[in-house]
Image (cartoon, grey):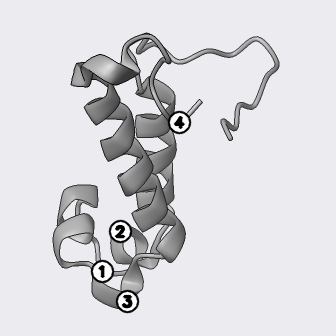
Amino acid sequence: MMRYEEENERLADRSTCAGVRAELKMCLLESDCCKIHKRTPKDCLLKGGDTVPQDCHVMRNLFFECKRSIIDGRRRFRGPKGY
């Protein structure tokens, strides 16, 4: 899922769900909503409409599930979703 230019390149953010967050951010920045309409990624998620691809909405749900699994007691032993 993660796309890096070099083999040993890593994210500076080591928090849980950082990889999913980075993928969501890159998906939104590459969308027509951010490129053509010059909106912020947050505005694109809230009011993007058809200019945001379905993949970005799927990534948003995956990020939500990952964050929710951090506080879900049943998921603590299984690990966060999205990996």
Mark 3 / mark 1, whichever is N-terminal: 1
- Label 2 residue SS: helix
Disc number placed over residue 50 in the picture, else none: 3
Circle 2 packing at 10 Å, graded few (<14), some (14-19), many (20+), is many
Q: Nearer the viewer, mark 3 or mark 1?
A: 3
In the rendered structure, which amino acid carries the disc numbered 4? Gly
Name the residue at 26% across, 18% down.
73
Residue 2 vertical placement versus 54 (above, below): above
Across and down, in percent, residue 18 comes to 43, 25
Query: Mark 4 sits on what residue?
Result: 82
Q: Name the residue under label 2.
A: 34
4 vs 3, front mark: 4
Residue 40 vs 81, above or below: the answer is: below
Find residue 19 and report its horizontal and vertical position in percent.
51, 29
Q: How crowded is mark 3: few (under 14 residues within 10 Å), some or many (20 or more)?
A: few
Residue 3: image quadrant is top right
CA distance for labels 4 and 3? 25 Å
Amino acid type, label 3: Asp
